[in-house]
Image (cartoon, helix red, strand yellow):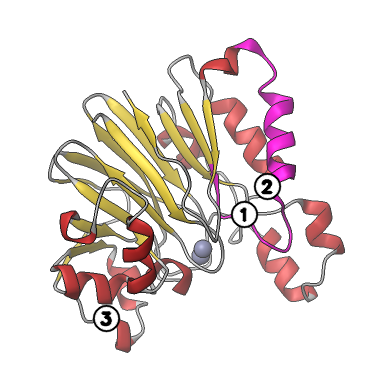
Amino acid sequence: MGLYFQILASGSKGNAILVCSEKTRLLVDAGLSGKEIVTRLGKTPVNGRQLNALLVSHEHQDHIRGVGVLSRRFDLPVYATPGTLEGFPPTEARMAQVHLFQAGSSFSIGDLHIQAFSISHDARDPVAFVIQNGGKRLGVCTDLGVATHLVRTRLQNCHGLIIEANHDTELLLNGPYPPHLKQRIRSRHGHLSNNDTCELLQTLFHEDLKAVAFAHLSEINNHPNLVKSMYRQFAASPLWEQVRFRIGMQHEVSEGVELT
Ligand SMILES: [Zn+2]
Ligand SMILES: [Zn+2]
């Protein structure tokens, strides 16, 4: 196994991404119930007892719902920024072990090397990650209102990218959300639109990019078919033929991708 990833769930009702090397297996976020995550792991090569750690991007419920339960049940260390940990509700802050890291720092979990970097989102100290093993780099970047210079720099030269494609701007503007929520989603501290993501991806393309997964799609303000058609348009060039493409879904486990 090289660097392997599989999206267990993605969207505003819960997020969890399995990332594995030969020796180390972790979840980036655990935002479904512990029980549901264990069930969904049944559709992956890894079970709960084989996990080594939980890595948390920020304290919103859709990213942490199962963190405490899984940590205690499988004796898993939880890696989070101090701000993220402070944001945990007291009822969910009991964990087997906690390892704090600073946004902007690098650290290792087993043979996975993690670079954490700040993103613009309405949480206390939110981060995205580049996870490396064996010369392969996987960028995991969801829940951001704007792709800053820092984000664009950190995500360069990744072999795999998991990137938010939250909403179609027209659907959002004409949809049922109240104005303040529309405003929050569109703000610099909200979520990336399909167009934002498309523009970002085009700047991140390089010849060793092998996989792109779109994540955190809104069930109300987006549709997998819209994301697929967006992708087909800009990936029509032969340059993109080598890139495998996935969509992280809310209610089903996506097909895994191995970066070799
Ligand atoms: Zn989220
Ligand atoms: Zn969030």
If the image is split into quadrants, where does the C terminus sit?
Answer: top left
CB under 8 Å between discs 1 and 2 = yes
Residue 57 image point, x, y percent: 38, 59
Of tags 3 and 2, the one toward the viewer is 2
Return the residue nearer the eye: 126 or 242.
242
Residue highlighted by disc 2: 224
Seen in the image, is 212 located left or right of residue 63? Answer: right
Residue at image position (52%, 23%) is 243
Describe the element under mark 2 as helix, strand or loop. helix
33 in relation to 29, above or below: below
123 in relation to 172, above or below: below
Residue 227's disc is: none
Distance between the Cα atoms at labels 1 and 2?
A: 8 Å
Q: In the rendered structure, which segment of residues is drawn in magenta?
A: 214-238
| Magenta span contains residue 219 | yes
Seen in the image, is 2 located left or right of residue 62? Answer: left
Residue highlighted by disc 1: 217
183 in relation to 150, above or below: below
Residue highlighted by disc 3: 93
